[in-house]
Amino acid sequence: MYAGKEFYWGREPNDFARKALEFLPDARVEGQLRAIDLGAGEGRDAVLFASRGVETLALDIAPNALEKARRLAREKGVRLETNRGDVNEVRFSRPFDLVYSIGAIQYIEPQKRAARFEHFKEGTNPGGIHALFAFVDDPRLPPAPDWGPGEHIYHPGELPGYYAGWGLLHFQSLVFDDDSAGIPHKHAAEEYVFEKPVQLG
Ligand SMILES: C[S@@+](CC[C@H](N)C(=O)[O-])C[C@H]1O[C@@H](n2cnc3c(N)ncnc32)[C@H](O)[C@@H]1O
């Protein structure tokens, strides 16, 4: 998918990345805002965050995707950190203000989800946000032809179950057209932006 010279997903950020920025706290009391893009692919969204002055880490399992992300960052003149990693295993070594993911949290194995989201939440600064896009099952739609064996669809409304006590800043349910496998098809998805309370309790 990423072997070609061209950018498979394009160079322009997703609308959801722009939306996430609207909800990002203006500044931290100390230091710079930090973001991690889980399953960042070729970095189109991570580079947007970096271009807004957010210290950004692009994480993906595919090294050739990250090579392209670094290339895009160079082209745009921004600093981007990249790390090869698996959403099932990654440990946050420092806290983030934005945990972002589009099209990749379905790679988290269902039995690991609760623990994984717990880890991502612990590794988030108070007032920080999680902007997450999840593919969800929809009985009206046939299974998508590009759905792989390592991908695990979410149930509608499942994600908020991992975010008890956090604020819900944004929710949108979507059905959209896709032809990423060369066959036109539809996906159902949900977008959420959750906010970590400044004081828990
Ligand atoms: C649909 S693409 C989305 C890429 C990017 N977020 C975007 O919107 O351009 C999904 C990405 O998840 C990555 N991926 C697949 N399995 C992964 C895993 N277990 N851990 C981390 N990334 C993974 C793929 O390499 C791919 O880049």
Image (cartoon, helix red, strand yellow):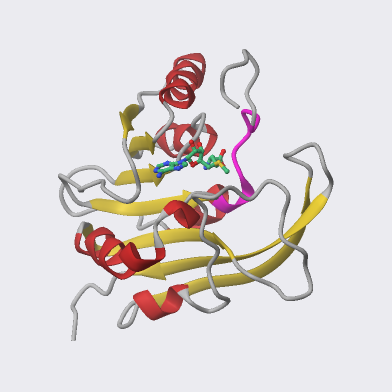
15 drawn magenta? yes
Residue 27 seen from this side: no
Of residues 130 and 42, the one nearer the viewer is 42
Question: Principal SS element in the magenta part?
Answer: loop
* Magenta-tinted stretch: 9-16
Residue 132 seen from this side: yes
Identify the residue at image location x=51%, y=20%. 72
**Does residue 167 lie above or below 46 as drawn?**
below
Residue 138 x/y as whole percent: 69, 73
Could you tell me how many numbered marks the image carries? 0
Residue 63 relative to residue 146: left or right: left
Residue 156 x/y as whole percent: 58, 76
Residue 64 relative to residue 8: left or right: left
**Does residue 16 lie above or below 32 as drawn?**
below
**Does residue 173 lie above or below 49 as drawn?**
below
Q: Spot the residue most to the front.
A: 149
Identify the residue at image location x=31%, y=28%. 81
Q: Quadrant of residue 24?
A: bottom left
Residue 175 x/y as whole percent: 74, 64
**Quarter of the figure with the N terminus:** top right
